Image (spheres, grey):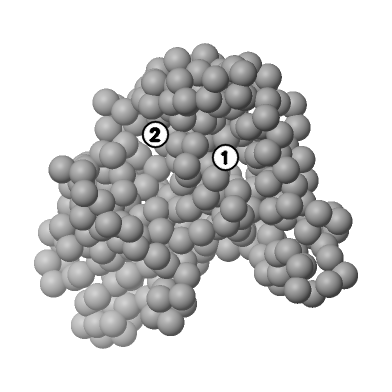
Amino acid sequence: MSREDLDKVSDEFMSILHKYIPNEMIVGNGYSEMSFDARLSNKNQAFSEGQYYFKGEKKFIHWTSVQNLMSIINYREIRLYNLHNSSDSEEFSYAAEKLNIDKNRVDYSKKYLYTLSFCKATELANEDLWKEYGKNYQGVAIEFEIVNNPNEWDNFMLSEVFYEIPQDFLAMENELKIFHEKYPNARTFIDLGKLIAFHKKPDFSKELEVRLSTYFPFNNTEAYEKFCHTEFRLEKGRPRETDYFGLKLWVDNESPFVNSDNPEFDRRLNLGTSYFIKNPQIIITNIYFGKNCGISNKEFMPFWTKLNHIAHYKLGYQIEDLEINLYG
């Protein structure tokens, strides 16, 4: 084909994409002979007018174990796991299959897509969620708020999860099939992984999940080896290993609880001025302990006093508005 003809085919390919994906979400496209590709933006602001951008109050509940709570506070970070950690073994594959994404691409995307799952803070009293994710009130619900501007985030997205196949994607896939019938030698590619991550089977609709995600957060192997960690899992029916990295919690560096004149005891979190601009700035606002967590009412206040003391010296701020009684 001549260059002029290839330009026309490329324009036809892009016209299909732009019909279903807003222009601002696609930041690059090109071709090499009959291979045509396009790329979604890494800037969260590019998705601000679409459904994959959370527009409500950014106060959430994350259920976890007491042990994980202490790890979060002690290490001053919350972990984002890749999709091999998901309780839904078919997550991502469900939508990918409908879009004719091959298994190798699915496995590749699941390895490099990292997520944190939670619900709106208004779901705190939801018994189903306490039973499922709070392990029948044996765990804790961490209430937190995301306080910085999501438009400034680089390679992070925040969205509700949708429990159906995206109809626009299905229609786009159908048009691309017609495109390939017209141009049988053409190869096309656009990686929709960061969007497919916000879709699950209808069976999981009771989760009411909101998800924070990042796709390929490491620019090179050296960064991956430094910031990514591996856990081995022994549960049957789950992948044997899963990777995670820690997203730092906000620490009040001006607080006397972490800011010391003695460099040996200085506990400020030094990440550079851009960290809590390009990344979500998460502040823990409350912690609710399930009634079956193993702490008696008699033990609870001394336990909380100690926990609040630890939070003071790790995060630089108090966790306010404690629910005096165990929750549930």
Q: Is residue 76 above or below residue 299?
A: below
Q: Which kind of residue does numbered mark 1 sit on? A: Phe
In which image quadrant can residue 247 be found? Answer: bottom right
The residue drawn where x is 43% and y is 82% is: 222
For disc 1, the neighbor class at 10 Å (few under 14, some 14 to 19, many from 20) is some
Which residue is at a point 31% across and 36% down the rendered structure image? 200
With 112 as the anchor, is 237 left or right in this view?
left
User: In this figure, which residue is indicated by the disc labeled 2?
Assistant: 162
Q: Is residue 34 left or right of residue 69?
A: left
Of residue 217 and residue 261, the one placed in the foreground of this image is 261
- Residue plotted at (57% across, 35% down): 142
Residue under pointer 1: 54
Q: Secondary structure at mark 1?
A: loop
Compared with 285, 279 (above or below) is below
Q: CA distance from mark 1 to mark 2?
A: 12 Å
The amino acid at mark 2 is: Phe
Occupied quadrant, residue 232: bottom left
Mark drawn on residue 242: none
Asked whether the viewer can see residue 51, the reply is no
